[in-house]
Amino acid sequence: MYAIVNPGVFNGTFRIPSSKSHTIRRVIIASLAKGESVIDHPLDSLDTQSCVAVCRALGAEIDLQYTDDAHSPNPPVPGRGKLIRIVVNGLGIGAGGSFKSPKKVLDVGNSGTTLFLIMAVAALGTGCLDFTGDSQMKKRSAKDLLDALEGLGVTALSQKGNGCVPVSIQGPMKGGRISLSCPTSQYLSALLLAAPLAPSGTITEIDVPLLNEKPYITMTLSYLDEQGVTYTCADDYSYFKIEGGAVYKPVHGPVPGDFSSAAFPACAAAISGGKVTLLGLNPHDTQGDKKIFPFLKQLGCNVTWNKLNDFYDEWELKVSRIGVMKGMEFDLNDTPDMLPALAAAAVYASGETGLVNVGHARIKETDRVKVMAEELNKLGAVVEEMSDGLIIHGKGGQSGAVLQGAKVKGHGDHRVVMALAAAALGADRPVEIDSAECVDVTYPGFLSLLGAELKE
């Protein structure tokens, strides 16, 4: 599918989709827990559907509930309405429960979060579980995680020997001390979620010589704290010790809005000179990508939080551009998913912007460092590719349109497509972007907010 985005000013009030990271963690924990969990306002996306399908295949009973509730952040599904709730009857792993033996290979689609977290969870059983994914997942190596699982007594094999799916996992997890390098934090989150459910008396120790995206570990640990899991860790997250024997309790409550998704309407406003009000976010959430808003403020945007309701802890966030943005350097090690959106915004700043210490953005759905440089340059931007990031020579403050209309590739990467769509708002003529359908991975409806024309 192609999206044609016309130049224009982006204004409005928008409820941000719920967090993918929170939604998937909650569905997995609920599937492992003993009892019924009720997850309100989860993200309704392709990644959520992949996670639900895998957990169902393992034996969890999951009911997706739809309604016309106007407060739901999800767009309506034709014939069903809006997803407002996921009800999960968990397996009680660690309390005598066990996995169902799937009749087919577990397909995670495009969801790396689902694959990496469930791979470690699969090691809690004794049967062999096979995983696959889409074409992008078949290029994303999990060798470090597979090696760590092997060190814990698990049989963890990549069928092609490259660390990518198809992979086979067979437990049980026996504990021990291993070293785990984490170019993505999801490897460590996977072991942190699985190790507490190993048999009582099992001790898992993890040395972490490399850890990117630390805020996501803070998020995972917040769930362990809620569950009363016993663990110790170094202040810098370089070492963990987790005791087995835990049983997860059901999880309840609404899923927070997604800061990763919120970056795109916010950057669209910054690029086009518009004003947006974003609903559903909480400034106190553990998501690392909330740093996008201090980043935009440093570039020269007006960013204002207003509390709407003390009882429900509801907030609104207003974002607009003040004059011409000015380039700066940003360390994106904690927030690699922000590279596409921030690169698009930086093109409209005056002067040089450096997006640095983010080489791990190369191992996402695509090599986002390379792809964003290539595609923005097709539109007339001046972007240099470095080994660990980008240098953007901004054109903000110049007369006329900053970018030129053209045909560009989205590379099947939802964040790349959304970033290019936002960048198109300041071009001199329409921009056509391919693989537009992949936006449904995390932000269904975003292209419609921009007024994009969609065609096959």
Image: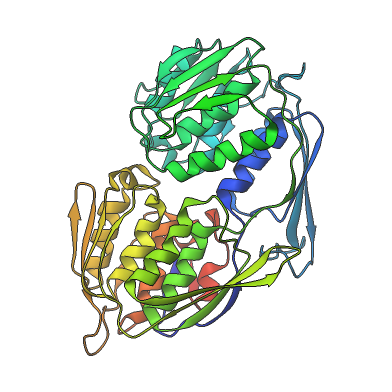
Q: In the rendered view, tell whether residue 329 sits above or below residue 252.
A: below
Q: In the rendered view, tell whether residue 120 sits above or below residue 13.
A: above
Across and down, in percent, residue 87 comes to 79, 44
Across and down, in percent, residue 326 comes to 26, 75
- The residue shown at (31%, 45%) is 362
Toward the bottom, the furthest residue is: 399
Left or right: where 326 falls relative to 127: left
The residue lying toward the viewer, choosing from 429 and 304, is 304
Q: Looking at the image, how many numbered discs can be counted on the residues? A: 0
**Residue 138 picture quarter:** top left
The residue lying toward the viewer, choosing from 1 and 49, is 49
Left or right: where 14 falls relative to 292: right
Left or right: where 326 falls relative to 85: left
The residue lying toward the viewer, choosing from 385 and 365, is 385
- The residue shown at (56%, 21%) is 242
How does the figure colour the protein chain or chains? rainbow
The residue lying toward the viewer, choosing from 80 and 18, is 18
Q: In the rendered view, tell whether residue 176 sits above or below residue 226.
A: above
**Residue 196 picture quarter:** top right
Toward the front, the furthest residue is: 235
Is residue 296 visible in this depiction of the protein? yes
Across and down, in percent, residue 19 comes to 58, 53
Q: In the rendered view, tell whether residue 99 sits above or below residue 437.
A: above
- The residue shown at (30%, 84%) is 428
**Residue 325 picture quarter:** bottom left
Is residue 135 visible in this depiction of the protein? no
